[in-house]
Image: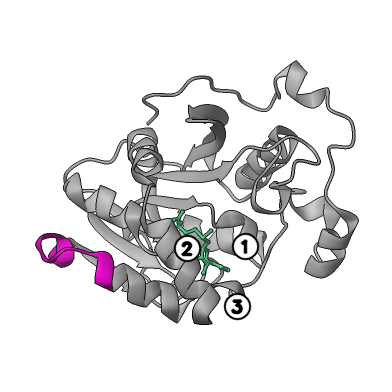
Amino acid sequence: MGQGREAEHGHRAHPGDRAHPGDRAHPGDQAQLGHKASSGPRAHFHPGRGDFEGVLGLLAGLTMSFGRGRSARLAAELAGVRVGDRVVDVGCGPGRFLREAAERGAEAVGVEPSGQMRRIAGWRTPGALSGRVRVVDGTAERIPLGDGSATVVWAVASFHHWSDPEAGLAEVHRVLQPGGRLLIAERLTRPGGWFRHHALTWEQGQDLVAQVERAGFSDVTAGRHPLGRVQVLAVQARRPAN
Ligand SMILES: C[S@@+](CC[C@H](N)C(=O)[O-])C[C@H]1O[C@@H](n2cnc3c(N)ncnc32)[C@H](O)[C@@H]1O
């Protein structure tokens, strides 16, 4: 699955990555989530979809429509998207990653709770790709697609918004066909970094690896990938083949 991967790690974090003190969730975030510390990663910072409606949603959507080509290419390369794939993008926002998948010959379905984002994704999809791109109203926790209907599921910068990661991972597992590929990508931050509510630390990525395994996936890895001045944390896995 992985091309262009700078490093790949299984369960062990890079020793240097664990060396930062205070690498834990903001206490307020845990409380806001009502999230059991033992059942999921300490990565669960910013649930909710209301942020992406109204004027703010419009501004966020337009901002995310541009300048994400390198991220989209990275996601497509990591997931090994090719002609004939059926890609489901969970939390697709304005749809830049859908267009990347479609340009590579895949059929792409975005699952997106924000009406504002769905509208922008529609506007931004060129006519030439419209037969291969669609966006449906849904969430990670409730994906309105059939069992085994995807060869690839990815979630880029959306996992940290999921209100129930355990339910979301169960849905992703259901929607993937056996042998299908999962990619969860988030910006990598240092503990206490200013972007921490919209990013994961390396240690949180390791927690996510464990959670993805508990959800029944195999070949679960975490890798870090430079992207300009930031790094992307990519957790990848497969639904077992049988
Ligand atoms: C930071 S944006 C990322 C959009 C897009 N993936 C990108 O990288 O350009 C996060 C998106 O996640 C969506 N979202 C929020 N809660 C969600 C949930 N529970 N399940 C799926 N998506 C969700 C938001 O509406 C928003 O469009």
Q: Is residue 115 visible?
A: yes
The answer to whether the residue bearing label 2 lies less than 8 angstroms from the nearest atom of ligand 1 is yes
Identify which residue, 102 or 84, lies in the foreground: 102
Q: Identify which residue, 228 or 44, lies in the foreground.
A: 228
Q: Amino acid at mark 3?
A: Gly
Within-10-Å neighbours for mark 1: few <14, some 14–19, many 20+? many
**Residue 81: x %, y % from top left:** 28, 41
- For the point 26% across and 49% down, the residue is 101
Q: Count the marks.
A: 3
Please state, as top left, top right, bottom left or bottom right, where the C terminus lies in the image.
top left
Q: Quadrant of residue 170?
A: bottom right
Q: Which residue is mark 3?
A: 50
Q: Is residue 144 above or below residue 38?
A: below
Task: From the image, give the main secondary structure of the stretch colored magenta.
Answer: helix
Q: Please provide the residue range marked out in magenta.
A: 123-131
2 or 3: tag closer to the N-terminus: 3
Q: Are marks 1 and 2 in contact (CB under 8 Å)?
A: yes
Q: Are marks 3 and 1 in contact (CB under 8 Å)?
A: no
**Dot in front, 3 or 1:** 3
Q: Earlier in the sequence, mark 1 or mark 2?
A: 2
**Which amino acid lies under the numbered mark 2 shown in the image of this protein?**
Gly
Q: Is residue 130 magenta?
A: yes
Disc 1 residue lies near ligand 1 with CB under 8 A: yes
Q: Position of residue 214 (x, y in %)?
A: 66, 47
What numbered label is drawn on residue 198?
Answer: none
User: Which disc, if any, is residue 161?
Assistant: 1
Amino acid type for the residue under numbered disc 1: His
Residue 92 in sight here: no
Q: Which mark is residue 91?
A: 2
